[in-house]
C-alpha cells in the first residue's frame, strides 16, 4: 500500500482515539470534583455536623475573625434553612461582610435579610444596617450619588417606621450627612453653571432645593451663591427691570438674615452696586 494513503487512512483513527481519551480524562476529573463536593456536603448534612461548624463560626465572629467566620457561614447556611439558628447565622454573615468592608455584599445581605424577616424583632436592626452599608459606599460629590440617595431613602424609611427606635439618633445623624452630600453635589452643579454664566439654569436648579438644606453653613453658602447669580444675571441683562428688582429684594433679605458673617461686607458692596445700577436705570426711563 502506498505509504501516503496509509497515513491518510490512519489520521481519523488517531484523532478519534485522542478525543475519546481526553474526554475520558475530563469526565473523570469532573466526576471526581462532583464526588468531592458531595462528600463535603454529606459531612455537614446533619444537624450535629453543621452545628459544630456553626459554633466554630460563632467563635471566629466573637474574636473578630470575620473572614474565617464568613467562609463557614457560606458553607453551612444552605443546610440550616429549617433551623432556629438560621436567622442568627444570616444576620452575622451580613455583619461579616460589613466588618470586612465588603459593603456591596453587606447591602445585598442586609436587604435580603430584612425582606425575609420583616416581621421579626431583627428587622429594625437590619434596616438601619442596610442604610449604613449604603452610606459607606456613598461616593464623592464629583461622582454619582446613587448609594447616597438610597441611604437617604432607607434612613427616612427607618425613622418613619421606628420613630422611637434604637438607632433613631444614628439614623437621623447619618440622614443629615447624606442629605448634605446630595446638596453639596447640587451646589457643585450650580457653581459650574454660575462659572459658565448660565445664570437662569443655575437659579432654576438652586431654587428647587435651597430651602431644604439642613446644614446652616451650607445654606448660607447656597444663598450667597444665589445672590451672586441674581446680581450678575441682572448686570448682563443691562435693562431688564424685574431682574434688578429681584436682585435688590434678595440682597436686602440676605443682609437682614445674616448680619454678621464672612459674606456681610461683600453683600453690602453688591447692594451698593445694585442701588447704583437701579438709579442709573431709573434716570433713563
Image: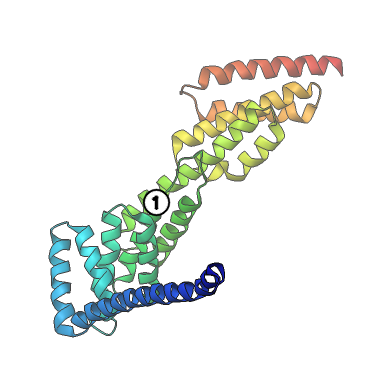
Which residue is at a point 24% across and 83% down the rendered structure image?
83
Toward the viewer: 277 or 8? Answer: 8
From this view, report whether residue 38 is shown above or below residue 146. below
Residue at the limit of the structure toward the front, as seen here: 1
Toward the viewer: 126 or 220? Answer: 126
From this view, report whether residue 19 is shown above or below residue 180. below
Give neighbour class at mark 1: few <14, some 14-19, many 20+ (Cα, 10 Å): many
Which residue is at a point 51% across and 69% down the rendered structure image?
7
From this view, report whether residue 161 is shown above or below residue 225. below
Quarter placement of the N terminus: bottom right
Toward the viewer: 222 or 17? Answer: 17
Relative image position of residue 181 (x, y in whole percent)? 46, 43
Residue highlighted by disc 1 = 135
Relative image position of residue 257 (x, y in whole percent)? 52, 31
Relative image position of residue 279 (x, y in whole percent)? 76, 16
In which quadrant of the rendered view does residue 247 lie? top right
User: Going by the image, does 216 lie left or right of 125?
Assistant: right
Please indicate, yes or no, whether residue 106 appears anywhere in the rendered image: yes
Quarter placement of the C terminus: top right
User: Going by the image, does 72 lie left or right of 118?
Assistant: left
Relative image position of residue 139 (x, y in whole percent)? 45, 44
Which residue is at a point 43% across and 76% down the rendered structure image?
17
Which residue is at a point 37% across and 73% down the rendered structure image?
26
Amino acid at each position: 500500500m502506498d505509504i501516503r494513503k496509509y497515513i491518510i487512512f490512519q489520521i481519523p483513527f488517531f484523532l478519534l482515539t485522542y478525543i475519546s481519551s481526553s474526554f475520558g480524562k475530563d469526565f473523570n476529573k469532573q466526576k471526581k470534583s462532583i464526588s468531592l463536593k458531595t462528600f463535603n456536603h454529606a459531612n455537614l448534612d446533619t444537624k450535629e455536623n453543621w452545628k459544630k461548624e456553626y459554633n466554630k463560626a460563632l467563635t471566629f465572629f466573637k474574636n473578630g475573625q470575620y473572614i474565617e467566620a464568613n467562609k463557614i457561614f457560606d458553607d453551612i447556611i444552605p443546610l440550616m434553612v429549617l433551623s432556629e439558628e438560621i436567622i442568627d447565622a444570616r444576620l452575622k454573615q451580613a455583619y461579616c461582610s460589613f466588618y470586612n468592608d465588603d459593603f456591596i455584599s453587606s447591602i445585598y445581605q442586609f436587604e435580603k435579610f430584612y425582606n425575609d424577616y420583616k416581621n421579626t424583632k431583627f428587622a429594625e436592626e437590619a434596616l438601619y444596617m442596610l442604610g449604613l452599608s449604603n452610606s459607606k459606599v456613598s461616593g464623592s460629590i464629583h461622582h454619582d450619588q446613587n448609594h447616597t440617595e438610597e441611604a437617604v431613602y432607607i434612613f427616612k424609611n427607618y425613622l418613619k417606621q421606628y420613630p422611637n427606635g434604637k438607632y433613631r439618633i444614628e439614623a437621623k445623624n447619618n440622614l443629615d450627612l447624606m442629605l448634605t452630600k446630595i446638596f453639596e453635589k447640587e451646589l457643585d452643579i450650580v457653581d459650574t453653571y454660575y462659572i459658565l454664566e448660565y445664570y437662569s439654569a443655575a437659579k432654576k436648579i438652586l431654587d428647587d432645593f435651597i430651602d431644604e438644606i439642613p446644614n446652616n453653613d451650607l445654606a448660607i453658602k447656597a444663598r450667597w451663591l444665589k445672590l451672586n447669580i441674581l446680581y450678575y444675571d441682572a448686570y448682563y441683562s443691562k435693562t431688564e427691570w424685574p431682574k434688578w428688582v429681584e436682585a435688590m429684594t434678595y440682597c436686602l433679605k440676605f443682609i437682614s438674615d445674616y448680619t454678621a458673617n464672612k459674606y456681610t461686607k461683600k453683600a453690602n458692596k453688591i447692594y451698593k452696586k445694585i442701588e447704583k445700577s437701579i438709579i442709573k436705570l431709573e434716570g433713563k426711563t
